[in-house]
Image (cartoon, grey):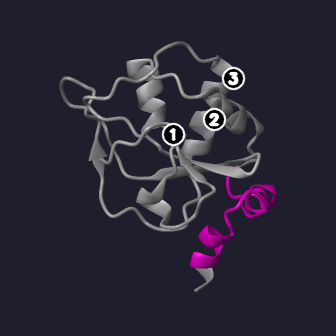
């Protein structure tokens, strides 16, 4: 998997959409923040990752590089709109937090807590309002 620094522009997935920032794209040699997250945040993140909306299919899957043995595989990505940005994270972020104590940036935590239910009309409106028109447009072409 491509390793990206938290809150850098996520050109890996979305081409030329400046609103999309990366969160949780961890690699084996990355130094990343560790700490505790609230149970409320973690449960909301798990719910969003259970069946995330995605503007395109993933081209492959990725095994966790942080696990010593038999890390889980994941291939889907999560898009969380908030305050003029869309945060893109691999769904493996749930595993990174639970197993490796990854601590996402506070703005991502706030975004997850504020995110409308996945695939709801308020979620799609939030995508559009926060710079995701290029993502939604890609589905209609």
Which of the pair 42/35 is nearer the observer? 35
Q: Where is the C terminus found, in terms of image quarters? A: bottom right
Which of the pair 59/7 is nearer the observer? 7
Question: Mark 2 and mark 1 in contact (Cβ < 8 Å)?
Answer: yes
The location of residue 106, given as percent across then percent down, is 65, 26
Mark 2: secondary structure: helix
Disc 1 marks which residue? Answer: 23
The location of residue 60, given as percent across then percent down, is 30, 59
Question: Mark 3 and mark 2 in contact (Cβ < 8 Å)?
Answer: no
Magenta residues, start to end: 118-138
Give how far apart the Cα atoms at labels 1 and 3 are. 19 Å
Residue 123 falls inside the magenta stretch:
yes
Residue 92 falls inside the magenta stretch:
no
Depth check, mark 1 against mark 3: the one in front is 1
Give how far apart the Cα atoms at labels 1 and 2 are. 8 Å
Which of the pair 12/125 is nearer the observer? 12
Disc 3 marks which residue? Answer: 40
Residue, x 44% and y 53% (percent of image)? 76
The location of residue 120, given as percent across then percent down, is 75, 57
Q: Main secondary structure of the magenta part?
A: helix
Residue, x 79% and y 60% (percent of image)? 129
Disc 2 marks which residue? Answer: 108
Mark 1 crowd level (few <14, some 14–19, many ≥20, 10 Å Cα) = many
Question: Mark 3 and mark 1 in contact (Cβ < 8 Å)?
Answer: no
């Amino acid at each position: 998997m491509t390793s990206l620094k938290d809150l850098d522009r996520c050109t890996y997935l979305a081409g030329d959409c400046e609103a999309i920032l990366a969160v949780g794209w961890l690699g084996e040699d990355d130094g990343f923040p560790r700490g505790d997250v609230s149970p409320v945040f973690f449960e909301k993140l798990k719910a969003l990752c259970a069946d995330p909306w995605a503007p395109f299919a993933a081209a492959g899957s990725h095994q966790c590089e942080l696990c010593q043995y038999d890390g889980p595989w994941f291939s889907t990505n999560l898009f969380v709109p908030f305050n003029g940005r869309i945060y893109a994270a691999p769904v493996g972020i749930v595993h990174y937090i639970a197993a490796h104590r990854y601590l996402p940036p506070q703005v991502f935590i706030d975004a997850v807590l504020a995110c409308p239910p996945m695939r709801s009309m308020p979620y799609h409106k939030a995508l559009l309002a926060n710079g995701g028109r290029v993502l939604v447009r890609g589905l209609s072409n």
